[in-house]
Amino acid sequence: MAQPSSEKTSSVYLYIPNIIGYFRIIINFIAFDVCYSNRVLFAILYFFSFFCDGLDGWFARKFNQASTFGAVLDMVTDRVSTACLLALLSQFYRPGLVFLMLLGLDITSHWFQMYSSFLSGKTSHKDVKDTGNWLLKLYYGHRPFMAFCCVASEV
């Protein structure tokens, strides 16, 4: 993870990307609160939160405000958002088991990637330079491909 610049550092909790992360959590609470009563508003709020997910990473790199706290906040917010969406979809569409299986795949794949990265001494699960897995290199090494995969997955 990049460290903040030594000149006038602020609390990691007040970094711009983390404030965006807190905002995403609030947006998601509102979105899932209205998901049954107003599906259009739900979709707008959910995809706005999804858009903000890309924004926080951009701000973290632009202002050198990447942090372990921010990475965990981002990943947990992503996993909870996806889990809630898949649980919701399992209620609307049958067979719901398909969505619950996707939920299991999402959580376990991210957990395995994070855990194996930290076991190998890496500070980020996105550090895949030394891996022989071409798909991980493509996904984490080329932001347009990652963005395409993320958007395709959410849509």
Image: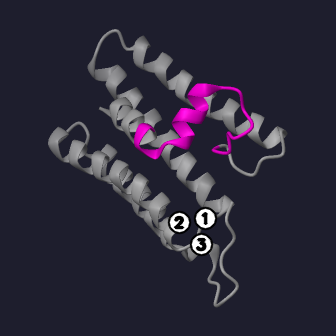
Q: Name the mark nearer the viewer: 2 or 3.
A: 2
Kind of element beneath mark 3:
helix
Q: Position of residue 152 (x, y in %)?
A: 34, 31
Q: Amino acid at mark 3?
A: Tyr
Q: Is residue 105 above or below residue 30?
A: above
* Direction from residue 135 to residue 150 in the image, left or right: left
Q: Which residues are magenta?
A: 126-145
Label 2 Cα crowd, 10 Å radius (few <14 / some 14-19 / many 20+): many
Name which residue lies at 75% across and 39% down: 117
**Residue 128 sits inside the magenta stretch:** yes
Q: Position of residue 97 (x, y in %)?
A: 43, 12
Name which residue lies at 41% across and 19% down: 99
Name which residue lies at 29% across and 52% down: 48
Kind of element beneath mark 2:
helix
**Residue 118 sits inside the magenta stretch:** no
Query: Residue beneath label 2, please?
Result: 60
- Residue 135 occupies quadrant: top right
Query: Residue beneath label 3, please?
Result: 13
Q: Is residue 49 above or below residue 70?
A: above
Name which residue lies at 65% across and 64% down: 67
Q: Name the mark nearer the viewer: 3 or 1.
A: 1
Q: Position of residue 101 (x, y in %)?
A: 49, 16
Query: Residue beneath label 1, please?
Result: 66
Q: Are marks 1 and 2 in contact (CB under 8 Å)?
A: yes
